[in-house]
Image: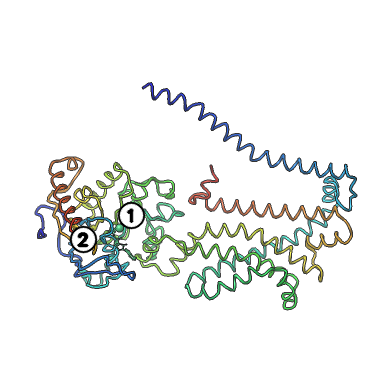
Amino acid sequence: MTAVESSVATLDPEEARRLRRERLERIGSWVLPLAIMVLAIWLWDRICVWNEIPQYILPRPGVVLQTLYNDAALLFGSLLVTLRITFLGLLLAVVGGVGLAVLFAQSKWVEMSFFPFAIVLQVTPIVAIFPLINIYVDNQTAKLLLCAWIVAFFPILSNTTLGLNSVDRNLRDLFRLNGATRWQELWHLRLPAAMPYFLGGLKIAGGLSLIGAVVAEFVAGASGQSSGLASRIIEAGYRLNAPRLFAALILISLAGIVIFLVLSLVSHLILRRWHESALKQER
Amino acid sequence: MVPSTTVPGMEGSGKPLLSLRAVGKTFSNGVTALSNVDMTIREGDFLSLLGPSGCGKSTALRIIAGLTAPTTGTLDWSRKPGEESSVGFVFQEPTLLPWASVFDNVWLPLRLKGVSRSDAAPAVSQLLERVHLSGFENAVPRELSGGMKMRVSIARALVTKPRVLLMDEPFAALDEITRFKLNNDLLELWQDERFTVVFVTHSVFESVFLSNRIVVMAARPGRVFQEVEVDAPYPRDEAFRTSPAYAALCRQASDVLVSAINSTHGAAA
Ligand SMILES: Nc1ncnc2c1ncn2[C@@H]1O[C@H](COP(=O)(O)OP(=O)(O)O)[C@@H](O)[C@H]1O
Ligand SMILES: [Mg+2]
């Protein structure tokens, strides 16, 4: 009896300490990055002032913000152009990646034969491929889309392929036992089982698609009439308009962050009832 | 070897339903999992396959299910013409679809046969009630305990009304209290619905409690060592579990199992 009581008594403060630490960690995980960010921006501002750096080399944060406001129509219009390419590229990457993965899952032979091509596309820098695309494809949007697609489809393809092949052996036996057709097994078992893998690939592909779109614009921008954020950056660079350059850069980063957050949320909503990864997020 | 005879007054044990004749299985890696297995499963049997790990119990079950073909020997299903040799299978793990609700998991075998959700609903609901899971239709497996998951798995195996229910150490991973409860409920289901069960286990106590016949197997190569009749009437309940008769039957089965294990040592030496 006394042993129990004393153990409870010693456990209590420890438990309280653990709780306090957890609460601190929860607050800290928000406050700390924010504080560091604010500090960095303040330092940026101070460095500009202390060293009297001219605006065309390094503009003060306030000036960038002002530019973002003043050039809003121009910049957000360009952002929309870039985002359109990004989303269409991502959509094509999903269709292409999942479609190819399903095809690969039909037979080991198909996978072995065609996976190398996917890898070649993946490892060759897009900047190096673009001149070829430039020669073969006329339509400007098609060019950019192709670029974004090449960069983004691989993580979806490889993750979904992995997922389709990671089905529990007993579950496959169960489907066989009940006379399931190939199509039924794919639809009711393999595709849902691959969902967490696919969503993991999607999160990576979202960011890559943005990168693909921007890089493609950069490379195309030299030769063309594209009006996305990348061409705004190039233009601003030529004109030594550093504030606008920074503003465009910030918009691209923000777009990337938002894309990642949205895809994470989608993934969480889809998996939250059954998958371990979502379970951990809940806690 | 004890000749297998029908125990008077016992449930089940009717006409032969399935005979394994000289069944052998050698895997491509050279392991002989089963050798020369003869076994007859009779209608209404609760037959246990009892033996040490690696003696080919799972392989035998998979052959009966048609998931693996035997290397030698034949399976004789005695069935009326045009009748399917339908089996239900319960794995050691609950093996549920983690993304699907309890209802959808039980519906699955019917769904694969083209039965719509609403057409399947009465059968599914009735079975869920039988395994004491009414009210959990919309839960997903993650929200259930180990014992409840196993109940879902049993309901799913029974939803197609199979003639034979094959169970591969289904309760091995459960705690004792849960296991006892599931044992009782399974027996109750079996007596009411009158299907045939082939139950794989490595627990003497479980096999004696549940079955009317125990096939004791020995390893290397996997073979039938001896058949043991469990001469105790059904229904068996918690009183039976603590009765001297149960203890005596367990001792008897245990002795056979020990000789089966020793026979392997002899063969290996
Ligand atoms: N697919 C397989 N390929 C090769 N060997 C196997 C395979 N399945 C089972 N075995 C071997 O066959 C033997 C019997 O296995 P199993 O039937 O699982 O035994 P039990 O269920 O009684 O533990 C073991 O030695 C095991 O390693
Ligand atoms: Mg086994």
Q: Do labels 2 and 1 share a chain?
A: yes
Mark 1 vs ligand 2: CB below 8 Å: yes
- Number of numbered markers: 2
In this view, B114 is above or below B214: below
Indicate left or right for B224 with A57 as reference.
left
- Can residue B79 be seen? no
Q: Residue at x 53, y 76 (%)?
A: A113
Indicate left or right for A116 with B261 as reference.
right
Q: Do the residues labelled 2 and 1 touch (CB within 8 Å)?
A: no
The percent coordinates of residue A229 (x first, y second) are: 78, 60
- Visual colour scheme: rainbow
Q: Ligand 1, what quadrant?
A: bottom left
Q: What residue type is labelled 1?
A: Gln
Q: Which residue is drawn at 48% across and 51% down?
A: A274
Seen as rendered, the residue at the extreme top is A2
Which residue in the structure is indicated by mark 2? B269
The percent coordinates of residue A72 (x first, y second) are: 82, 53
Is disc 1 placed on a helix, strand or loop? loop
Instruction: Give the chain of mark 1.
Output: B
Structural crowding at the residue carrying mark 2, measured as other residues with C-alpha within 10 Å and reported as few (<14), some (14–19) or many (≥20): few
Is tag 2's residue or tag 1's residue first in the polypeptide sequence? 1
Q: Which of A74 and B64 is in front in this view?
A: B64
Picture quadrant where residue A82 is located: bottom right
Which residue in the structure is indicated by mark 1? B92
Mark 2 vs ligand 1: CB below 8 Å: no
Nearest to the eye among marks 2 and 1: give it. 2
Gap between marks 2 and 1 measured at Cα: 32 Å
Is disc 2 placed on a helix, strand or loop? loop
Q: Nearer the viewer, residue B31 or A39?
A: B31
The percent coordinates of residue B198 (x first, y second) are: 24, 58
